[in-house]
Image (cartoon, grey):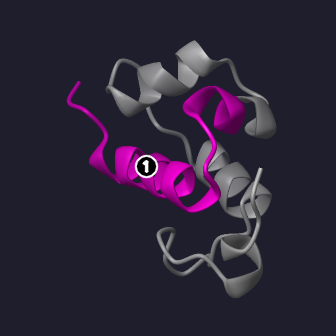
Amino acid sequence: MAKNLELSALISRIKYELHINQAEIAKRVGIAPTYLSDMINGRVPYSDSLRGKLIQEFRLESGSELNFNSEASSIRA
């Protein structure tokens, strides 16, 4: 399975915008950091459920997972 570029870009954007690490992202969506890494690197499938959790937890625009709304962009962890 190839690296999941959509998830990788999404996680990178969250890390950049909110100044948090991958382990904190995993914690906030309720999964193990290693499981998130496995999804990013294509070792396990990226689920719609995780996509929904990321959109909800980080207040992303549902139409485009890489567009943060203004409220989420101002959040600093």
Q: Nearer the viewer, residue 55 or 27?
A: 27
User: Quarter of the image holding residue 42?
Assistant: top left
Where is residue 3 drawn, in percent x and y?
Answer: 25, 33
Residue at label 1? 12
User: Of helix, strand and loop, which mostly describes the magenta segment?
Assistant: helix
Q: Does the magenta portion include 19? A: yes
Image label count: 1
Secondary structure at badge 1 equals helix
The amino acid pointed to by label 1 is Ser
Compare residues 24 and 56 and report the one nearer the observer: 24
- 4 left or right of 18? left
Residue at 72%, 72% (x, y): give it. Answer: 72
Q: Residue furthest top?
A: 34
Q: Which region is colored magenta?
A: 1-26
Mark 1, Cα crowd under 10 Å, few <14 / some 14-19 / many 20+, is some
Lateral position of residue 28 relative to residue 13, left or right: right
Residue lying farthest left? 2
**Position in image of residue 1 (x %, y %):** 23, 24
Q: Is residue 58 above or below residue 43?
A: below
